[in-house]
């Protein structure tokens, strides 16, 4: 065995003292390796568990909350939607294709572990503006997402793509998946009992991905090539067989519990099942199918893909094995569930590790110091004198910049229709899929605003969450629950930890006020190098339910002659807006964003839902990145119909380009205008103009032909 002292396992002096106290002895080398990886940030959440407890976790639609492989919300008709988002940032920065591909495969298995059929994926992609190394990384990551997702047969229905130089060294990939499961058939990781067998199903174990959890718990190496052996290798065709086999076993009642082998592989899956179920477990190294000769520590820390740990009663194992043989999958009993609380590892009859499972499942919490960044006042201050000299010219710049232009070059690589459940794929404000045996629709919104979270972490994160809920309401959906991925640099830096804490507070505040529970999530820290660090990126995915497909309100459906209404305040904030960053002298975000007002957002949501139920709007679009001007331009581009709007008196820069707040554009047939206005009584409403013609004209500024808008928006060159 390679000598592995506690420091090389990522254990600090203080943590090692705690281990000695808990064990009453010194751990051997294998035990040290096992504890080290389970106490890594990636597995233990030791820096964030206290923060995450602030999230509301219960609600009338929550069937399973945090603590399982994924959350589950109740979609009605006996169906649940399992949902979760996870990061694969470090692997994607080092080996873009495989890092992204295995990120997609891993999140799919989290959903599968709940007994759910994976049906839809989304991806949060954060890149530096496309050139040189960044362009190579971006292309490889997108190819990895497409290559795995398309082959495994799960639709990629949407996502979020964001560009800033802070992601030059550390691009981010946040992978989301959801799947349907009968509520009376949800699989738990907490139901193992003494006498059950621990069964490994799927691919053989190899050296790929060894210590990947520890790798994801530190900043990237100066020479990232040193990290390549820690990147997993995925096989989507093997995963497809694994999905079908697991679902067949579950449908026949042949498994008592199931756990994905993600970070820390066999170690995490087996120890988590034992710890959550309150039982002991014995694992026999010699029974584990290997691709190559491996030491015990390598076996347990390997993150080889396409593997699941099943908990099975002895009398059902022959049936499980027969099903696995049918799908040509490895299926081997590797251990026993026993009484007690011990995690034991044997090799050819010799006990080589013996630990209480609690030491693996309950890493000591870390309480990092927190201090507001010294330049936070400067970040929150909007630069003086910023004014648009030519709004029409600025609008074209916003539409043609990397962050503003069409992302079709990316999402056209994805299969968004496989399984034939997709109602709305990439390109809209929400994605939508059908609910089995129902007329209902599930809507999904993925949002993140790194610039706003940089200038004011609390307000920025609050705006991210609020915007995710606004697009749900305008689409006709009531929010069922949210999952999130918190992407930050090192928490050991007090200023970074302040930003992390404030972002969590901002998300939690809006979730509490708007009654949207957090059902699952992921934390990714140490997203930095010696040269740079990322901005704060709390990414959220909200799942909503439209009770009948006729209530679903789309964007991009306006027709000539429709009246254009703005509901909500005329202006939001230019702080950290797309216009502010694009037009600033240094390209840095400055200025705080719009302050969340719960009463105003609740009034907005209730009226938006009523509008959907009465079917009085032809099309609707929440005002977001680029402000009202960009929202009008995108509707014109989607419909091929011109727009004429008068925003009234005021500062044109703010009227055109400000962002944030509960605001939306509605496109309404003239005959429905009175009904529409009655539904929005008591809320700010302005009739801006009407749809028609072949150009966009706002406040009498220079008319922009639709062809010119399209040329700017569809410029291409992202990859």
Image (spheres, helix red, strand yellow):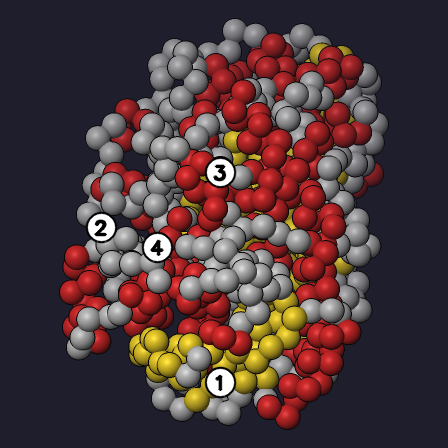
Q: Which residue is mark 2?
A: 368
* Lower position in the chain sequence, tag 2 or tag 3: 3
**Disc 1 vs disc 2: Cβ atoms closer than 8 Å?**
no
The residue indicated by pointer 4 is 41
Q: Is residue 327 left or right of residue 265?
A: right
Asked whether 385 or 259 is in front, the reply is 259
**Distance (Cα) linking label 4 and label 1:** 28 Å
> Real-space Cα distance between discs 1 and 3?
37 Å
Helix, strand or loop status at disc 1: strand
Q: CA distance from mark 2 to mark 3?
A: 28 Å
Residue 336 image label: 1
Q: Residues within 10 Å of mark 3 (few under 14, many from 20)?
A: many
Q: Nearer the viewer, mark 3 or mark 4?
A: 3
Is 265 rendered above or below residue 472? below
Q: Earlier in the sequence, mark 3 or mark 4?
A: 4
Label number found at residue 365? none
User: Which numbered disc flags the more N-terminal residue, 1 or 3?
Assistant: 3
Mark 1 and mark 3 in contact? Answer it, CB < 8 Å. no
Give how far across and how far down residue 578 sits, in percent.
51, 24
- The residue at 31%/43% (across/down) is 490
- Residue nearest the viewer, comparing 322 with 206: 206
In which image quadrant can residue 460 be found? top left
Closest to the observer: 133 or 465?
Answer: 133
The residue located at (19%, 71%) in the rendering is: 26
Within 10 Å of disc 1 (Cα), the crowding (few <14, some 14-19, many 20+) is many
Residue 385 in percent (x, y) is at 38, 11
3 to the left or right of 229: left
Mark 4 vs 1: CB contact within 8 A: no
Between disc 4 and disc 1, whose residue precedes? 4
Write down the residue under mark 3.
94
Image quarter for residue 365?
bottom left
């Amino acid at each position: 065995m390679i000598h592995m002292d506690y420091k090389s396992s990522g254990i600090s002096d203080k943590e090692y003292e705690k281990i000695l106290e808990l064990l009453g002895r010194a751990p051997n080398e294998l035990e040290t390796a096992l504890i080290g990886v389970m106490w890594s940030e990636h597995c233990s959440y030791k820096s964030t568990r206290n923060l995450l407890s602030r999230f509301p976790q219960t609600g009338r639609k929550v069937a399973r909350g945090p603590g399982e492989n994924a959350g589950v919300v109740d979609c009605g008709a006996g169906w649940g939607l399992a949902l979760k988002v996870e990061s694969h940032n470090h692997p994607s920065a080092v080996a873009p294709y495989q890092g992204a591909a295995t990120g997609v495969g891993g999140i799919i298995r989290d959903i599968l572990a709940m007994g759910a059929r994976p049906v839809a994926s989304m991806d949060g992609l954060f890149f530096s503006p496309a050139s040189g190394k960044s362009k190579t990384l971006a292309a490889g990551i997108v190819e990895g997402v497409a290559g795995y997702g398309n082959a495994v047969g799960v639709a990629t229905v949407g996502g979020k793509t964001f560009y800033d130089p802070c992601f030059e060294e550390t691009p981010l990939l946040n992978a989301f998946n959801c799947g349907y499961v009968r509520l009376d058939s949800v699989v738990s990781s907490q139901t193992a009992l003494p006498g059950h067998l621990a069964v490994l199903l799927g691919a053989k174990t190899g050296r790929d991905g060894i210590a990947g959890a520890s790798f994801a718990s530190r900043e990237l190496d100066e020479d990232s090539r040193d990290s390549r052996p820690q990147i997993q290798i995925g096989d989507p065709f093997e995963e497809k067989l694994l999905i079908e086999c697991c679902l067949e076993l579950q449908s026949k009642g042949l498994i008592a519990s199931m756990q994905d082998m993600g970070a820390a592989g066999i170690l995490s899956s087996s120890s988590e099942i034992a710890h959550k179920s309150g039982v002991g477990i014995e694992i026999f190294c010699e029974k584990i199918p290997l691709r190559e000769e491996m030491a015990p520590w390598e076996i347990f820390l390997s993150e080889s893909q396409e593997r699941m740990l099943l908990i099975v009663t002895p009398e059902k194992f022959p049936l499980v094995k027969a099903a696995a043989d049918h799908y040509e999958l490895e299926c081997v009993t590797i251990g026993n569930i026993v009484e007690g609380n011990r995690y034991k590892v044997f090799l050819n009859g010799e006990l080589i590790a013996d630990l209480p499972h609690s030491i693996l499942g309950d890493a000591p919490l870390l309480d990092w110091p927190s201090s507001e960044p010294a330049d936070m006042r400067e970040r929150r201050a909007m630069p003086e004198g910023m004014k648009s000299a030519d709004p029409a010219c600025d609008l074209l710049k916003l539409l043609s910049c990397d962050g503003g232009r069409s992302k079709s070059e990316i999402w056209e690589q994805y299969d968004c229709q496989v399984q034939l459940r997709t109602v709305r794929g990439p390109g809209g404000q929400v994605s939508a899929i059908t609910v089995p045996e129902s007329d209902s629709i599930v809507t999904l919104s993925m949002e993140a605003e790194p610039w706003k979270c940089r200038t004011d972490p609390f307000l920025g994160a609050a705006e991210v969450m609020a915007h995710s809920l606004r697009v749900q309401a305008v689409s006709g959906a009531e929010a069922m629950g949210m999952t999130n991925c918190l992407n930050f640099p090192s928490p050991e830096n007090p200023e970074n930890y302040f930003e992390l804490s404030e972002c969590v507070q901002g998300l939690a505040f809006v979730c509490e006020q708007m009654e949207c529970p957090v059902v699952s999530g992921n934390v990714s820290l140490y997203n930095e190098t010696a040269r740079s660090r990322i901005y704060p990126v709390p990414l959220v995915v909200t799942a909503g339910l439209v009770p009948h497909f006729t209530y679903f309100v789309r964007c991009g459906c306006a027709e000539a002659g429709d009246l254009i209404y703005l509901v909500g305040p005329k202006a939001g904030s230019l702080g950290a807006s797309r216009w502010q960053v694009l037009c600033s002298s240094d390209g840095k975000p400055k200025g705080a964003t719009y302050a969340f007002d719960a009463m105003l957002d609740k009034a907005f949501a209730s009226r938006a839902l009523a509008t959907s139920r009465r079917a009085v709007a032809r099309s609707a679009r929440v005002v977001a990145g680029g402000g009202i001007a960009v929202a009008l331009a995108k509707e014109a581009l989607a419909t091929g119909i011109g727009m004429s709007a008068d925003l009234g008196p005021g500062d044109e820069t703010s009227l055109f380009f400000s962002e944030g707040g509960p605001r939306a554009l509605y496109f309404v047939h003239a005959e429905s205008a009175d009904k529409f206005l009655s539904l929005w009584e008591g809320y700010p409403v302005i009739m801006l103009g009407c749809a028609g013609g072949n150009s966009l004209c706002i406040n009498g500024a220079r008319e922009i032909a639709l062809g010119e808008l399209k040329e700017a928006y569809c410029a291409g060159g992202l990859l």
